[in-house]
Each structure stands twice: as structure tokens, then as C-alpha cells.
Image (tube, grey):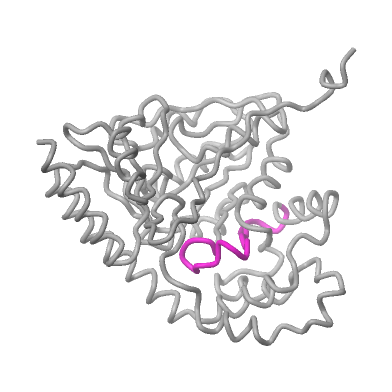
Amino acid sequence: MSWEENVRKVIPYVAGEQPNQPGMIKLNTNECPYPPSPEVKKAILSLEPEKMRLYPDTDAAELTNALAEYYGLKPEQVFVGVGSDDVLAMAFLTFFHSDKPILFPDVTYSFYDVWADLYRIPYHRCALDENWHICPQDYMADNGGVIFPNPNAPTGVEESLETIERIVSANRNVVVIVDEAYVDFGGHSALPLLEKYDNLLIVQTFSKSRAMAGMRIGFALGNEKLIRYLRDVKFSTNSYTMNYASQVIGLEALKDDGYFHTITQKIVDTRERAKVKFRELGFRFPDSKTNFLFVTHKVMPASRLFAALREKNIYVRYWNKPRIDNYLRVTIGTEDEMNRLFAFLEQYLQNRS
């Protein structure tokens, strides 16, 4: 018998490429193109080295309390983790503990099936319709839980609050998780439904709209009982997940609401201009309420465009997967980065017309 027979084997999540090339344009991982709030820099300079030798606050109490106040909830309704991936992984481990399959879209965040495989959770992918929308009736089947992003990734499509409520209300005997990683770019949060539904968990992140992917701060909002169960699982694995620096810096980022709205609006404005330019160049895409666009060209294959862009140190995201193998996901960058992207695309497409 080989020791490998007892190894837990999974196919891991593959993150977007993280190149480090001079002069590159990095539009492949949905990072914010702008730096964090100036208050973050001040907070970094104010960190106390003496506190580095101590374990951090297991409850991240100051950040948790501030998030509760910001969203009009009680602290007992907020769970803080090391990025939304950590929060979601904890939620899978906590709430999806049934022999019935959990449900999520067939085109969605590709970490969901990885966590399901890792934790031995049965799952079923529900096909999005031809316009990349969820079919609510698919989520009315008997299941062990439901999860979907809103707006969705990689499509950028937003579902209405009415659609979300239909799904949540039809699944009162399981937990429904709405992953709102991109909600701050023009989407509508399911937050108003929390008071009505005790089986709803909302997950958000500081990585995109607050320009802090490097600090790994995510959080969940929900019923007090849901949050208590999440905390129990967290404290059964690792009590000291969020470090001292992230707690301090995250608090200051949250306080600077003016800066948050300024940079998200800049990204939205650039996105809307990018939609016009992409259309002029012969691209099609679903309407996006995120910080990216999911584009396909009328004649040029996505795989060829991806390779040509990469040769010029312009990085976008491409998946060789069913239904989406002729699409590119393009993160919205700065105005200059987008102008350089479009200048290349215009020349490249013109030379091959």
C-alpha cells in the first residue's frame, strides 16, 4: 500500500497569472487600478512594532464593530476573514454539510467546485440562460445549499433583488450565499433581505473596491445564528486568522468613505467608456455591473487575441472552457491603461481585417 492512497487529491483553483514585467498592463485579476485610501498609508506608518509579537485580536473587534455600524447591523451579524475566499471556504465547511448537492451556476467563480471537491460536498451546476442570467426555477430543486455571485463572475451580469428573493424564499431549509465581491461597482446588495430571511449569508471583500487585495480582508453579513456557527468553525481551525496590521489598516480604509466612492466611480466611468470603444471595435459583451467586461469579438477568436495581447505585455483572462472559450475577461484599468489596450486592439484588428 502506498502512502499516496491516503492523500486528499483535488484539482486546485488556478488564479490569474501574476506577471512582473516592466511596462506591462495587468488587466487579468480584477485588482483595483488605484492605490488604497491615503488613510491606509497613515495607518501603516502608525503600526506599533511591539504589537507584532502578540497574537492579534481573534474577534477583529474594532473592524467588526465598524463594519456593523457601516451596514446598519449588530456586531453579532458580522464575520471577518482573510479575504472573501477565506470567508467563503469557511461558509462551505460550515453550512454545506448534506448528502444533497449544493447548487451554483455553470459559468461562475471557479473556486466553488474546488471547495466542494475539497470538502467532499456534492454539487450541481445550473446552466445560465443564453443571456448569462440565472434561471431561478433551477434553484427550486431539492438541494443542500445554494451559492452564486451577484454580479456574477466572469460575466459581470447582475440579477435583480426580486430574483434573489425568489431563490432565498424557496430554499428556507438551507443556507443561500450571495457572493457580492463586485457589488460596489453599480450592483445592488441583497442586504435589505437580511432582516426577512435568516438563511441568507452575504459575502463581500476589500480586495476590489477598496483597493486592498494585498491585505486579504473579507467579511460576511447575516443572521446572528449563522455568524455564530461560522465563528465556531473558524475557532475550530485557526483562531488567529486576521493579522494585526490588516485589522488596523482595514478599519482606516472603511472610514474613508469619500475616497471609496471616488475610486469606484472612476472605475465605473472608465468601464462605461470602455463599453463604447469595445463596441466600435466589433466586440460584444453582456452588460457589466462589475470592474471588468466579458468580451467576445465578432470574427477574431479569443484565444488568438489573448496570445497577441500577452506578447505585448497586456494581460487579460482567458479560460479554455465550454461556453466561455471565445470570451476574454478584461479588468478595467486606468484611463491610460485602457487607452493603450484599445490602441493595440485597433491596430491588431485593422491589420487582420
Q: Quadrant of residue 122?
A: top right
The relative height of residue 76 versus residue 347 in the rendered view (above or below) is below
Q: Which residue is outermost to the right?
A: 1
Q: Quadrant of residue 342?
A: bottom left
* Residue at 83% across, 49% down: 237
Number of callouts? 0
Which residues make up the magenta segment? 206-225
**Residue 117 located within the stretch drawn in magenta:** no
Quadrant that contains the N terminus: top right
x and y percentages locating residue 149 in the rendered image: 48, 46
* Residue at 41% across, 29% down: 320
x and y percentages locating residue 114 in the rendered image: 62, 34
Image side of residue 84 versus residue 322, left or right: right
Q: Nearer the viewer, residue 83 or 124?
A: 83
Image side of residue 313 versus residue 177, left or right: left
**Residue 211 located within the stretch drawn in magenta:** yes
* Residue at 16% across, 55% down: 276
Image side of residue 218 versus residue 303, left or right: right
x and y percentages locating residue 124 in the rendered image: 54, 25
Q: Nearer the viewer, residue 310 or 12?
A: 310
x and y percentages locating residue 254 in the rendered image: 56, 76
* Residue at 63% across, 77% down: 251
Quadrant that contains the C terminus: top left
Q: Nearer the viewer, residue 147 or 338?
A: 338
